[in-house]
Each structure stands twice: as C-alpha cells, then as structure tokens.
Amino acid sequence: MPRTAVISQDVVERARNILHAKPLHQDALKALSIILPMVMGATIHQTATVLCISTASVARLQAEIRNQGTGKKDKGSWGG
C-alpha cells in the first residue's frame, strides 16, 4: 500500500517561492499543462495553481501543443 506524503504548508510555500524565483522552461510548462490534467485529472485552475501561472496561460500553452505540426498559427498577443 503506497504511503501518503505528509507535506507541511511551510514546505509548500518554500517550493512555490523557488518556482517563482526560477520559473520552469517554457517547453516544460507546455508539457505539464497537458500532462497534469491527463494523468492527475487536474482542472485548468488546479493546473494553473501548480504551475504558478494564470488559467489563460494554461489554455494558451495547451493550444500551442495542440496546434504543433498542424500549420495553425498562434493568435498572437491581445495588445494593440
């Protein structure tokens, strides 16, 4: 029977601080935006929280992977 990890809130905060200070490489974020929901059943909000990015960024990263090799281009920035 697998053991459940016991992790204090303090350790979680330290891990988040590390992630904020040294963000993941963009390719790793893209991959995790797909893998976390599929393997762990995480929602887009949970995925965003784990990756320390916005839900809009999760959706954008997922779209980038979906559109790879299809010839579809990114919509680009929303700015003017």
Image (spheres, rainbow, N blue to C red):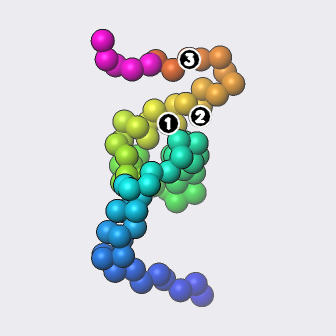
Q: Secondary structure at mark 2?
A: helix
Give the Cα distance between marks 2 and 3: 11 Å
Q: Are marks 2 and 3 in contact (CB under 8 Å)?
A: no
Mark 2 vs 3, N-terminal side: 2
Regarding residue 43, the answer to whether it shows in the image is no
Compared with 34, 3 (above or below) is below
**Distance in Å between CA atoms under marks 2 and 1:** 7 Å
Q: Which label is found at residue 71?
A: none
User: Which residue is outermost to the front?
Assistant: 21
Q: Residue at x 53, y 42 (%)?
A: 26
Residue 78 lies, with reference to residue 66, above or below; the image says: above
Residue lying at 38% horizontally and 56% vertically, measured from the top left: 21
Q: What residue type is disc 1 on?
A: Leu
Across and down, in percent, residue 63 comes to: 52, 31
Judged from the image, the secondary structure of the residue bearing numbered disc 1 is: helix
Query: Magenta-highlighted stretch: main secondary structure?
Result: loop
The image quadrant that residue 1 belongs to is: bottom right
Please name the amino acid that badge 2 sits on: Ile
Per the model, the C-alpha gap separating discs 3 and 1 is 13 Å
Please state the extent of the stretch shown in magenta in the rendering: 76-80
**Residue at image x 52%, y 59%?**
40
Q: Position of residue 12 (x, y in %)?
A: 36, 71
Which residue does the numbered mark 3 point to in the structure image? 73
Task: Indicate whether residue 29 is drawn in magenta.
Answer: no
Magenta stretch: includes residue 79: yes
Asked if labels 1 and 2 touch by Cβ distance under 8 angstroms, the answer is: yes
Q: State which quadrant residue 46 falls in.
A: bottom left
Q: Image height check: is 46 above or below 15?
A: above
Q: Quadrant of residue 7?
A: bottom left
Residue bearing the label numbered 1: 61
Q: At 54% from the left edge and 46% from the top edge, which residue is drawn?
A: 25
Give the label on residue 65, or none. 2
